[in-house]
Image (tube, coloured by chain):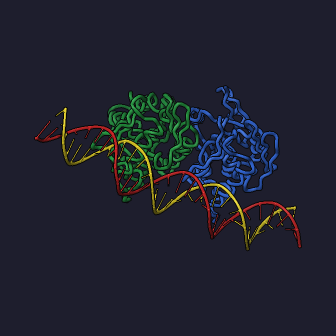
Chain colours: A green, B blue, C red, D yellow
DNA sequence: AAAATCATGACACAACCATGACAATTCAGG
DNA sequence: CCTGAATTGTCATGGTTGTGTCATGATTTT
């Protein structure tokens, strides 16, 4: 399962270079060029780790970091052009997990990203939603719901985590197919239906719940959370 | 609850200064001056985070780091006198969580320690050798379970201890192979299955028990404890 | 030399998955 | 409202893949 990264960086050149490099390393990379763009993105998407530049056109990384921390328990790695102790302290106080000042070795950035991801998947708490009785156990391919552990098969889990990382967005069957099975696989569209049907059953994601797995007729499916 | 730190550093001056500073910050600090001393300490004690110098009189920090990783899922922060990319890479490959080169700002070290501890909340429970009627005897290659001593062969013991130190995590066959047999060994994946099968039998790690050795189909194995 | 341990291949079995068939639902146009 | 077409829910099924486990010969230890 590909890990999702978000790069928040205003320098277009740097941003695309970094994105390309990290994609080559097998990550699923998204980018934002400003605080506003990043906030917009994060309200509808979940990622595993955010690479955060401090100097941004419409605000700074520290505030964005705090904004994120209030909402999500996602890994954050700060990048900064200045190597000032003041910034370093502000960065960690605002809640970053790691901090690297430019110019940095690209190998080091990669190693630090991997170290953060390694550690966090080792421990139990990558759950973006450990509260309200819903928790994703990436390691075990299982979901803990109301303190009950529900095991999902490999494909079922992949589909679920895809939907979860695109919370509230309607995902078409083909999108899901491409992401879960891969680009060039000849599998019937409708196979997705089966898995979704099973997910609804095994996770009881029906109308009464916090999370719902809704069918958007003619489009696809959407995992959707009330509030 | 005070967090426990272990400082592994041969320079006596540096070691005691560091220890004093961290104690003032409210940590419970222990120290070791050599690889041997650190190993001895860690066989009987558990800590939350280890600060590890690379240059040590009787070995180096990389090997010690791997030695620890085999046994405990504890946080590690490496310190090094040299700022070489080679060392940096070796450090992260051997499994460190963070890496800082001297001279460092003492504020930065403290911030990084706190950031690591903040993220990994449930540490010590994951790295205990004796836990609910289960005890690993590293010297004898044996397991004491419910006050009954069970001898394991060398490889079986290695596999079990790897699984045990990664409690609740699903370990792939390749991970286990790399850790137990070494990186460049041409041994069949499926050999692991045999040992796991035997472990289940000899330790009775089946459904009724406190500890279970579960198969996560398509991923690997997971030793996990029902709280 | 004898015993213990290990790596491998073979086979059976169980879990998983993709598919097609048919029932249920939705929706547009009469 | 009704009706029929399109879309989706769900079940049963056969085929595929992954895993448990045993027997065996090779290797190491005693």
Q: Nearer the viewer, residue A188 or A52?
A: A188
Q: Nearer the viewer, residue B32 or B39?
A: B39
Position of B61 with respect to A56 (left or right) is right
Residue B28 in picture, x, y percent from top left:
70, 30
Q: Nearer the viewer, residue D18 or A78?
A: D18
Residue A164 in picture, x, y percent from top left:
42, 39
Position of A150 with respect to D26 (left or right) is left
Q: Is residue B217 above or below residue B148?
A: below
- Indicate the quadrant where residue D14 lies: bottom left
Q: Is residue B17 above or below residue B36?
A: above
- Indicate the quadrant where residue A10 lies: top left
Q: Is residue A17 visible?
A: no
Position of A191 with respect to B149 (left or right) is left
Position of A209 with respect to B202 (left or right) is left
Q: How many marks?
A: 0
- Indicate the quadrant where residue C28 lies: top left
Residue A78 in picture, x, y percent from top left:
46, 38
Residue at the image point whose x is 59% and y is 33% from the top:
B121
Q: Is residue B36 visible?
A: yes
Residue B227 in picture, x, y percent from top left:
65, 34
Residue at the image point whose x is 67% and y is 25% from the top:
B1
Q: Is residue B171 above or below residue B183?
A: above
């Amino acid at each position: 399962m590909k890990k999702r990264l978000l790069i928040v960086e205003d320098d277009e050149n740097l941003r695309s270079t970094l994105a390309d490099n990290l994609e080559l390393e097998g990550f699923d990379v998204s980018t934002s060029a400003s605080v506003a763009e990043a906030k917009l993105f994060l309200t509808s998407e979940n990622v595993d780790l955010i690479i955060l530049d401090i100097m941004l056109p419409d605000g700074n990384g520290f505030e964005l970091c705090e904004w994120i921390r209030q909402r999500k328990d996602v890994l954050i790695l700060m990048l900064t052009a200045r190597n000032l102790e003041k910034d370093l302290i502000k960065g960690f106080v605002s809640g970053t997990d790691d901090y690297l000042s430019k110019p940095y070795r690209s190998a080091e950035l990669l190693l630090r990203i991997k170290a953060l991801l390694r550690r966090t998947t080792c421990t139990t708490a990558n759950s973006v939603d450990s509260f309200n009785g819903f928790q994703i156990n990436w390691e075990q391919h299982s979901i803990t719901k109301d303190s009950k552990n529900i095991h999902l098969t490999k494909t079922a889990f992949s589909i679920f985590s895809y939907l979860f990382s695109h919370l509230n967005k309607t995902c078409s069957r083909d999108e899901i197919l491409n992401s879960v099975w891969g680009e060039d696989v000849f599998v019937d569209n409708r196979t997705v239906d089966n898995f979704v049907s099973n997910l609804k059953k095994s996770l009881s994601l029906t109308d009464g719940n916090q999370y719902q797995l809704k069918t958007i007729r003619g489009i696809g499916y959407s995992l959707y959370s009330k509030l």
